[in-house]
Amino acid sequence: MKDKRLFTPGPTEVPKEVLKAISGKVMHHRKKEFSGIFENVIKNSASVFRSQGEIFLFSSSGTGAMEASVVNLTSPGDKALVIIAGKFGQRWAQLCSAFDVETEIIDCPWGEAVDPQKIKDSLQANPDIKAVFTTLLETSTAVVHPIKEIAEAVRGTNALLAVDAVSGLSCEELETDQWGVDVVVAASHKALMNPPGLGLLCVSDKAKRAYENNARKSYYWDLKKASASLKNLQTPYTPAVNMVYGLDKAIEMILAEGVENVWQRHRDLAGVAREALQDMGLELFSTSPSNGLTAVKVPEGKDCKKILTNLEENARMVFAGGQSHLKGKIIRIAHMGWCAEKDLRRALDALKKELEKQ
Ligand code: PMP
């Protein structure tokens, strides 16, 4: 496995500088030296989130940070609006159900983005909606949703807007404060160029007031406790210390490249992928294709499993297939995070050769 290049939408490739940082000596998390690194991560990640809001780090996967959003923004019996356009929209709905939150659902065909007007209409019809849960980059379909327009639809209502940017942060344009997004969820193992292990949350003042006054109790995910610790540059419980070194390094690399340049690099990579794939005669799956990964339909008569296995065994490249009902029907190629054009072109060439062989 060690020699296989990941073109999967998480985990993704990790630069050697980050791996080196992670392999550093373990520090005690209550000591000044570690707080200095933690402070750096929090301060610098504000530039990636494009927000002056509170930033929390959890030793968890992305789903943990999604759960933290649901338990802190809602109480049992509250109503939320959930946009489902794939597997990760479904996850929001499942979390709401697990925590006794009533849901209004906007169901979009997989492969399509949500129409913001539907959100506006739903909020008008249901003024008691406390929160809107949606996704920036729906990884299961390679769709990017129009968060700016969604935020406009939510603006002026009492509802909070929570965006799952687990896959999207740093590869899709997101202006958290400027657009008026209240909660952004992220994770280390996508465009943030780290192994899995850290979940991140960025929280607006409006969302802070909501969690401070929320009746529901939680323990590990309690943002009131996390916020009190954050003031002392700490986390309530032992953080994944070495992962924090890795995130510090990766964010330093993103800021050195420039957040907008990183967005542009992803736009360019997505352009290369779409053009090359269409030149191979393949059809894009998404009608609102993302910049972090590209999905194509498996051509009639081709065996998806065989294509993916051969690419892995022979070309030593790991691509992703479809999830749920899309299993066997689409191939997903991630170009998020630590990905240069030459890496992507190598992957596209390998896919082309494999398709020709079949
Ligand atoms: N949301 C999105 C958009 C994702 O892509 C993923 C991971 N594939 C998750 C949430 C869940 O993250 P995790 O697997 O880290 O819990």
Image: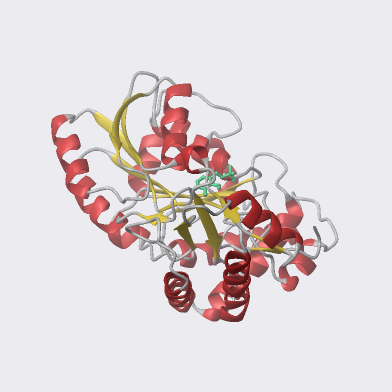
* Most foreground residue, 203 or 346: 346
Would residue 32 be seen by someone viewing this image from the given angle?
A: no
| The C terminus lies in quadrant | bottom right
Residue located 58% across and 58% down the image: 190
* Most foreground residue, 111 or 282: 282
Would residue 171 be seen by someone viewing this image from the given angle?
A: yes
Residue located 76% across and 66% down the image: 19
Q: Is residue 73 left or right of residue 148?
A: right
| Residue 96, image quadrant | top left
Q: Is residue 356 left or right of residue 325?
A: right
* Colouring convention used in this rendered image of the protein: secondary structure
| The N terminus lies in quadrant | bottom right
Residue located 62% across and 71% down the image: 353
Percent position of residue 42, x then y:
56, 59
Residue located 42% across and 19% down the image: 100
Does residue 52 sit above or below 105 in this rendering?
Answer: below
| Residue 130, image quadrant | top left
The number of numbered discs placed on residues in the rendered structure image is 0
* Most foreground residue, 236 or 311: 311
| Residue 86, image quadrant | top left
Does residue 230 sit above or below 14 in this rendering?
Answer: above
Q: Is residue 350 left or right of residue 273?
A: right
* Furthest-right residue in this view: 25
Does residue 250 sit above or below 56 in this rendering?
Answer: below
* Most foreground residue, 351 or 10: 351
Percent position of residue 334, x then y:
55, 62
Percent position of residue 120, x then y:
17, 43
Percent position of residue 326, x then y:
48, 43
